[in-house]
Image: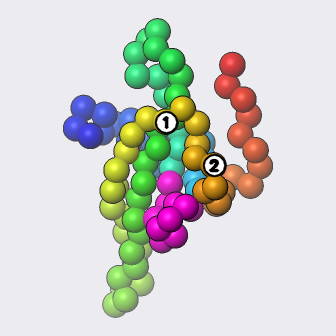
Amino acid sequence: MGPHRDLVRQAVENPVEVRWDQTKHRNEVFYRRWQLRRRGPRSWLKVVVRFTTDPLTNQQSGEVLTAYPMRRPKPGEVRKWPERTIPRWH
């Protein structure tokens, strides 16, 4: 993840869409559109984050578990945000 750390941060801080992970429901999935190379295909960056809450302070923190490119968001994941459909990218 080292060389793409800024892309991962952008996906978490300013996602196009956030979903609940299909198999591990306490994980959230952040999607952002990106292009690895100037002339390469457009795709999605998927960042999986596990959030936990400190029982003493009630503060929430998150840990990035993994991040990788995908052709499109994974079917079957339940959308958390936004509630509307994502516009097509031409």
Side of 66 where 30 appears, left or right: right
Residue 25 visible to the viewer:
yes
- Determine which of the numbered discs, if any, sits on residue 43 in the image: none
Pick the quarter of the image with the C terminus: top right
Instruction: Provide residue 26's location: percent of width, then percent of height.
Output: 48, 71
**Residue 24 sits inside the magenta stretch:** yes
Q: Residue at x 37, y 89 (%)?
A: 55
- Determine which of the numbered discs, if any, sits on residue 75 in the image: 2
Q: CA distance from mark 1 to mark 2?
A: 12 Å
Q: Residue at x 67, y 25 (%)?
A: 89
Q: Residues within 10 Å of mark 1 (few under 14, many from 20)?
A: some
Q: Is residue 12 above or below residue 43?
A: below
Number of callouts: 2
Location of residue 7 by image quarter: top left
Q: Is residue 60 above or below residue 17?
A: below
Part of the protein shown in magenta = 20-29
| Earlier residue among tags 1 and 2 | 1
Instruction: Provide residue 44's location: percent of width, then percent of height.
Output: 52, 34
Secondary element under disc 2, as helix, strand or loop, is: loop
Pick the quarter of the image with the N terminus: top left
- The residue that label 1 is drawn on is 70
Q: Is residue 17 above or below residue 71?
A: below
Q: Is residue 33 above or below residue 41?
A: below
Contact between marks 1 and 2 (CB within 8 A): the answer is no
Side of 25 where 75 appears, left or right: right
Work out whether residue 58 or residue 19 is closer to the camera in this orientation and state it.
19
Secondary element under disc 1, as helix, strand or loop, is: strand
Location of residue 83 by image quarter: bottom right
Name the kind of residue labelled 1 in the image: Met
Q: Residue at x 47, y 67 (%)?
A: 24
Name the kind of residue labelled 2 in the image: Pro
